Amino acid sequence: MKQPYEIFNMIVDEEAYDQEEVTADFTYQEQDYSITFRKGDLEVVNAWVFKNGVSLPANLSENIIESIRADVKNRI
């Protein structure tokens, strides 16, 4: 099944404030986003949308977050 987003970069940061994190950069509905999860339980730390060179808090549906979480889990 084709996903409605495309992850184009993923970083596993093992030294972020004593908490390992995973950041996935992806394109969704022709916009670039970044979402960071705690590596241990994949809870969302933050999510951003990039518009006109500015990052703003992203308002993503729970369905998209769950789909990306599953994708990230499979990749790490």
Image: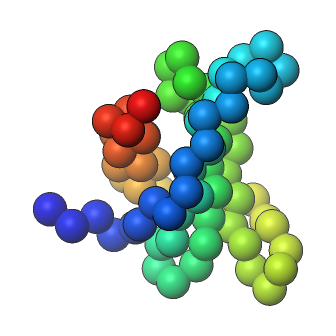
| Residue at the (42%, 31%) spot, across then down | 76
The quadrant in which residue 50 appears is bottom right
x and y percent of residue 67 in the render?
35, 49
| Residue at the (70%, 59%) spot, across then down | 48
In which quadrant will I find the N terminus?
bottom left
Location of residue 23 with respect to 7 vertically, above or below: above
User: From this viewpoint, which residue is outermost toward the left?
Assistant: 1
Location of residue 10 with respect to 76 vertically, above or below: below
The quadrant in which residue 12 appears is top right
Q: Is residue 66 visible?
A: no
x and y percent of residue 23 in the render?
62, 44
Location of residue 16 with respect to 31 vertically, above or below: above
Location of residue 65 with respect to 16 vertically, above or below: below
- Report the front residue among 23 and 63: 23
Q: Is residue 8 visible?
A: yes
The quadrant in which residue 66 appears is top left
| Residue at the (46%, 60%) spot, across then down | 7
x and y percent of residue 29 in the render?
47, 79
x and y percent of residue 65 in the render?
46, 48
Specify whether 71 is left or right of 16: left
